[in-house]
């Protein structure tokens, strides 16, 4: 009886060892697959954030391209407002030098402020206010500002979601190994209640 018990125990140990030898690689493979899936999720979110930022950047560049036209339209009517015109040029240069989302947000704030100021001064001039080119540029810049605000909200929502994932396990663990860091939101001041219109 003891021999039978001993044989059964040896068979049971051998079976357990074989079973363990088969299950351990499957468990490791499962954990690796899960880690890769989490990493891919973070990469997908990062790419979506990059795409949203590219959309904001494109709209800001379009506005950037409209500013020389606006300056040329306003310049003959606002010769006495050279300081206001120069501030638009300076803000435009600052935007051209900006590279990160934070720098672009600061430059966007500055450009929006000086353009708002320029438009406020411009509409006080009745000749300029009735200029068809000025009215068209003002409408185009307002349209771009509205689109930037919508894209910025979308971008910031994605950044918030990404950063929240990075703060919680198991994504936090995978993020450390994949060297993923929290992204900065695009925070710019909101235009006044009428957009850029004074």
Image: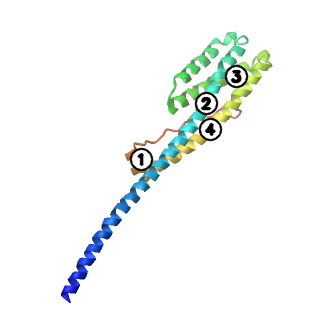
Q: Which image quadrant is residue 67 in?
A: top right
The kind of secondary structure element at disc 2 is helix
Q: Earlier in the sequence, mark 4 or mark 2?
A: 2
Q: Is residue 42 above or below residue 135?
A: below
Task: Name the residue beneath numbered marker 1.
Answer: 175
Q: CA distance from mark 1 to mark 2?
A: 29 Å
Task: Name the residue beneath numbered marker 3.
Answer: 119
Res 44 seen here = yes
Q: CA distance from mark 1 to mark 4?
A: 26 Å
Q: Is residue 165 above or below residue 62?
A: below
Task: Name the residue beneath numbered marker 4.
Answer: 151
Q: Are marks 3 and 1 in contact (CB under 8 Å)?
A: no
Picture mark count: 4
The image position of residue 143, as x and y in percent, is 71, 31
In the displayed orientation, state which residue is furthest to the bottom.
Answer: 1
Q: Are marks 1 and 4 in contact (CB under 8 Å)?
A: no
Please state which of residues 51 and 25 is positioned toward the viewer in this rendering: 25
Q: CA distance from mark 3 to mark 1?
A: 46 Å
Q: CA distance from mark 3 to mark 2?
A: 23 Å
Q: CA distance from mark 4 to mark 3?
A: 23 Å
Q: Are marks 4 and 3 in contact (CB under 8 Å)?
A: no
Task: Name the residue beneath numbered marker 2.
Answer: 58
Q: Earlier in the sequence, mark 1 or mark 4?
A: 4
Res 164 seen here = no
């Amino acid at each position: 009886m003891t021999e039978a018990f001993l044989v059964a125990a040896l068979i049971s140990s051998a079976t357990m060892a074989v079973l363990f030898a088969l299950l351990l690689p499957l468990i490791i493979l499962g954990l690796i697959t899960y880690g890769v899936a989490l990493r891919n999720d973070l990469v997908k979110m990062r790419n979506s954030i990059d795409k949203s930022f590219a959309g904001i950047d494109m709209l800001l560049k379009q506005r950037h391209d409209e500013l020389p036209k606006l300056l040329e339209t306003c310049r003959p009517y606002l010769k006495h407002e050279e300081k206001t015109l120069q501030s638009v040029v300076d803000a435009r240069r600052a935007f051209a030098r900006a590279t990160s989302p934070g720098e672009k947000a600061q430059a966007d704030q500055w450009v929006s402020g000086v353009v708002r100021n320029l438009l406020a001064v411009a509409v006080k001039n009745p000749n300029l206010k009735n200029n068809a080119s000025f009215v068209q540029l003002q409408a185009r810049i307002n349209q771009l500002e509205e689109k930037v605000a919508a894209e910025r909200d979308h971008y910031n929502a994605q950044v918030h979601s990404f950063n929240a994932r990075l703060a919680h396990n198991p994504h936090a663990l995978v993020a450390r190994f994949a060297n993923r860091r929290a992204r900065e939101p695009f925070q710019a001041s909101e235009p006044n209640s009428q957009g850029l219109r004074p």
